[in-house]
Amino acid sequence: MDRRDFLKSASAIGVSAAVPANAQAAPSSPIKRPESPNMIYRELGTTGERVSAIGLGGYHLGKQSEANESINLMHAGIDRGITFLDNCWDYNDGISEVRMGQALRNGYRQKVFLMTKMDGRTAVEYNKQLEQSLGRLQTDMIDLVQFHEIIRMEDPDRIFAPGGAIEAAIAARQAGKIRYIGFTGHKDPAVHLRMLETAQKHSFHFDTVQMPINVMDAHFRSFTKEVMPVALKQGISVLAMKTFGDPYILKSNTVQPIEALHYGLTLPVSVIITGIDTTQVLDQAFEAARTFKPLDQTQMNSLLARTATAASDGKFELFKTTSHFDGTAQNPKWLG
């Protein structure tokens, strides 16, 4: 899908994709990576980077019983055209990063846009976690590091306070350890909006923001409706997650995997980060890319109507309504 179609699809569903003329310049020159005809590629906000529209979710890459299974799965995805890799300092107690670091040897690091996340809210904790992640990932530079699990109203205050994690992130960017800075969260659009407002008050521009975007989100605490327009207006790349609801949305029997992916790809997102833990699920993601055509308004309305009742109280988006997915709530020491 070219940029014209991309913007057209955004307009069709009522989401503005305007980018301010004074958007902050990228801190470093974009890197050109090989692209495959088997994958869709999109601009990463205002960074100038181009990345695959399907991203490999890091949590699922630490679940295989043997490390070689994870490594082979990553190599297969990269060889077929995926360039965006997701991870986090705490995934599977660090195993996800360790295995990704092993997979990125022998020239694979140069083929990908590498992202991971930090839980630390203080500069001290952020720096400690970043050094561990650099070691596990076997790299001296991570393309994008995001503040993880911004799920509490006080998280922005802690990060932007004196001695907060934002100071460490900016210093790490200046030192060349990271290239771009973003944040993630899955709980409530109000928290994301507060993070964006707090950043503006401190004259800071995020490069990316990651959020739940799926066929049920439009009906309940909607990040798509409330956060996405604000991010796009500020020139911030939107990274989609929870396409299948890990995997409760699919268990609702209201939508099939390919159409759920097509729904997300129709929206003005840069990347859909999806959990891929088997070759079958990897094949499914590439089939979604191969068959993708932006859904028209009638198709979008049909999907939303089909999921409206099931989505009304958030029972299939447990990351919003329970603490089941809140790793930092279960391990507050990670915050610092």
Image: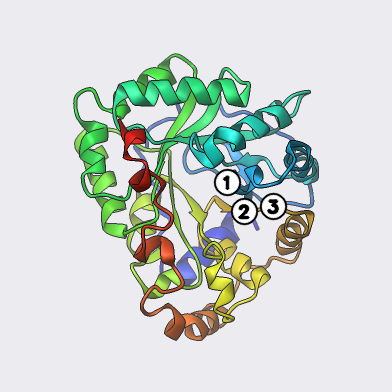
Which color scheme does this rendered protein use?
rainbow
Vertically, is 170 above or below 219? above
Q: CA distance from mark 3 to mark 2?
A: 6 Å
- Disc 3 + disc 1, Cβ < 8 Å: no
Mark number displayed over residue 59: 1
Q: Is residue 108 left or right of residue 179?
A: right
Q: Is residue 2 above or below residue 115?
A: below
The answer for how far apart the CA atoms under marks 2 and 1 are is 7 Å
Residue bearing the label numbered 3: 277
Q: Are marks 2 and 1 in contact (CB under 8 Å)?
A: yes
Vertical position of residue 235 compared to residue 26: above or below = below
For badge 2, the amino acid type reads Gly
For label 2, the SS is: loop
**Residue 54 screen position, x and y as percent:** 64, 52
C-alpha gap between disc 3 and disc 1: 9 Å
- Say which label, 2 or 1, has the lower sequence index: 1
In this picture, residue 130 sits left or right of residue 67: left
Query: Which quadrant of the figure has residue 113?
Result: top right
Judged from the image, the secondary structure of the residue bearing numbered disc 1 is helix
Q: Quadrant of the N terminus?
A: bottom right
**Residue behind mark 2:** 275
